[in-house]
Amino acid sequence: MRFVSLAAILLAAPLAHADDWPQWLGPQRDGVWREAGILDKFPAGGPKVKWEAKVGQGYAGPAVTGGRVFLNDFIPSGGPAGSAVRGGKGTERTLCFDEKTGAELWKHEYPVDYRIQYAAGPRCTPTVDGDRVYSLGAMGNLYCYDVPTGKVIWSKDFVKDYEAKVNIWGFAAHPLIDGDRLICLVGGSGERLVVAFDKKTGKEVWTSQSSQSDAGYSPPVIYTLAGRRTLVIWHGSAVAGLDPETGKRYWAYPWVTKYALNVPMVRQVGDDKLFFVAFYDGPLMLRIGAETTPVIAWKGNSKGEKPEQTAGIQGIMPTPYLKDDYIYGVCSYGELRCIKADTGERVWETRIPTVGRPGEEGKPTRWGNAFLTPYGNRFMIFNEQGELIIAKLTPQGYEELDRAKIVAPLNKLAGRPVVWVHPAYADRCLFVRHDTKLVCVDLAK
């Protein structure tokens, strides 16, 4: 009888849902943290650091899944970490850690000769798919590893194998898993801008598209638009909608962006619209029809990238987030903005969460940055000062609930110390790195 009662109690008790973060922007590649049991305010002295692990420099965030943490980093051959503005030899690595203890389980390393600006490490978060993990380095080195052992299963060199032109700021478009394919923005010659590989063998499945400029940095993403499953590729001279199965082009919208600086991922709005944010060229909302060329729903009338010249959201790194017909995103000089999704009209802005502090807006700061991660009715905001903020973002404004220092900003290539890394949120913890360590921070209630 006691056994039955205990079982009934256990069955009736709500189960706290734990989740992984196996790729950039999380399980559904949408940047939403869906776990329950997350704290509302930080304890005195800040959240508990569960462990720290020594790592090299980089802009790549971690991936967390299956009890392991994966990270890409860079060890320069000479000089202090983050010292090279452009160029420098060294070693890129993919590291695997135990999620509970931070103990290193395996690593793979290979030499690189950086010929890029902001030569301070890889940009891409590893992508984990079952017993394989995929890593893309800043110079276009793509590796597929065995998760348990770190053994290389297959690899590609975008520059040598595809005659890819190295972008000014390196390769930064996170690879995308789709069924049996790994889809990459390669930037190769001819019709090899986009390549789909067999994820198990590395064999080409299809190649597609070409570009008149750099390939750009925006990650590939798949949406259902106008009733059709569509792979959206935003590169330096156009936006293209492709068949994910074959690479066949459904439609294209010509759009040459300055320096191909199109970093944030494209966001879907409703059933038939796509929202874009470019640092120099401003925001754009396209309407996608089943059989027609995309048309402009609205476009920001920006005059430049400075705060008084911008319209809507005109950010450089963070992907904006859509909620209840409003879009929230970080603009060119650190302004967190809210705009109306149907018109692009600005509702409010503040620099408090990016370069400021409670009660202080902070000065306009070029490339001032913070990454927004919604969970429930709140947001986790990790800013370039290495702080984690709990806040509410609504059309009525920004409401900060708490903030805590997590890591120190060490990278000085922006002319000031910054942490430009998107965190991972998994198992009710925050995982984030700077240029010397990776930390796991407890965020459970």
Image: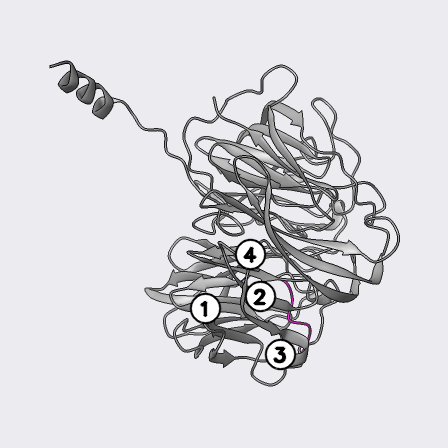
Task: Tell me where the magenta segment starts and ends, as one range.
Answer: 211-219
What kind of secondary structure does the magenta stretch mostly adopt? loop
- Could you tell me how many numbered marks the image carries? 4
Which is nearer the eye, 236 or 408? 408
What element does badge 2 sit on? strand
Give the secondary structure at mark 4.
loop
46 lies above or below 127:
above
Q: Amino acid at mark 1?
A: Lys
Residue sitting at 64 percent across and 68 percent down? 141
Residue type at mark 2: give it.
Tyr
Q: Which residue is mark 3?
A: 188
As measured in the structure, the alpha-carbon distance from the residue carrying label 3 to the one carrying label 2 is 17 Å
**Amino acid found under the numbered disc labelled 3:** Gly
Q: CA distance from mark 4 to mark 1?
A: 22 Å
Q: Can residue 194 be seen?
A: yes
Residue that mark 4 sits on: 265
Answer whether labels 4 and 1 touch (C-beta < 8 Å): no
Q: Which mark is residue 143?
A: 2
Q: Residue furthest left?
A: 1
Residue 373 is situated, as x and y percent measured from the top left of the image, at: 53, 39
